Amino acid sequence: MKKLFLLLVLLVSTIGFAQKGKGKSAAKNVVLTKVDNISAEIISEKSGKRVVLFVKNGDKIDTLEVKKLDKVDFKPTNFTVKSFTTQGKKFYHVNWKEEIKLDTKLKKENGVVTEDQLWDTETKTLLLGNIHKSSHIKETIFLDKNKTASHDVEKNRSEGFEFTLNADGSFVLKTKTQNSTYVYNTASSKYEIKGAPKTSGPKKKK
């Protein structure tokens, strides 16, 4: 009888431990896309969530931070990572979009936030980070302090620069009043405005 009691105790303890361990399973990373030796993923940590690029080079894996996530429900659309070549260098273009939706009694907004990043994964350098927001807004404006009369106003809003990556690896940043083309300068290892004086290397001592 004593042996049977001990067996039951052990069995209950084993089941309880298995269930407890199962409840503590670690959150899995969310893979957004993969290309070449790169995996773009959402990772969960004690400090919060991040979007990172895991770049595998042989036995080594570099982690490049793309974005810290303030929102829990980060749901990007068309998240892509594509390689391109310019001035003999291979870089990666990271792009994604997020939809904006706001619906209240006085204001309705529908729009898109587009983020573009250019990475040199070899040197682990972010060459460009650009955010552009475009939205259509319909808002009710009151004409008097007592709010007895009102009219609706509709407008399109654009914030930041529109980004376009060209086939030769240069890119354009554009607004209504500005339009600039940037090209990669191998001497400075940076993108610079086309037509600007080029940065030369260090002068050799005679």
Image (tube, rainbow, N blue to C red):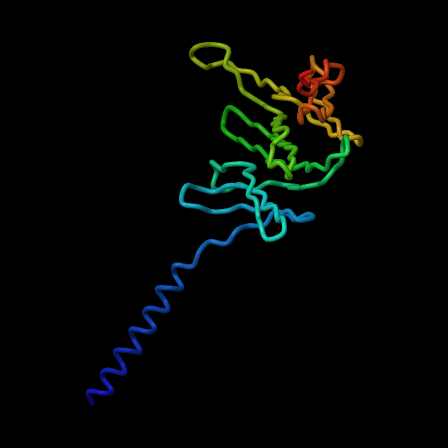
From the image, which quarter does the N terminus lie in? Answer: bottom left
Residue 201 at x, y = what percent?
Answer: 69, 21
Q: Which of 175 and 3 is in front in this view?
A: 3
Q: Which of 165 and 113 is in front in this view?
A: 165
Residue 191 at x, y = what percent?
Answer: 68, 24
Q: Nearer the viewer, residue 87 or 118?
A: 87
Occupied quadrant, residue 109: top right
At a point 61% along the width and 46% down the height, the residue shown is 55
Seen as rendered, the residue at the extreme right is 167
Residue 26 at x, y = what percent?
Answer: 44, 56
Seen as rendered, the residue at the extreme bottom is 1
Residue 147 placement, left or right of 31: left
Is residue 112 at least partly visible in the picture? no
Is residue 7 at least partly visible in the picture? yes
Residue 134 placement, left or right of 150: right
Q: Check the image and report above or below for 45 versus 152.
A: below
At a point 65% along the width and 22% down the height, the residue shown is 161
Q: Nearer the viewer, residue 144 or 170?
A: 170
At a point 72% along the width and 22% down the height, the residue shown is 182
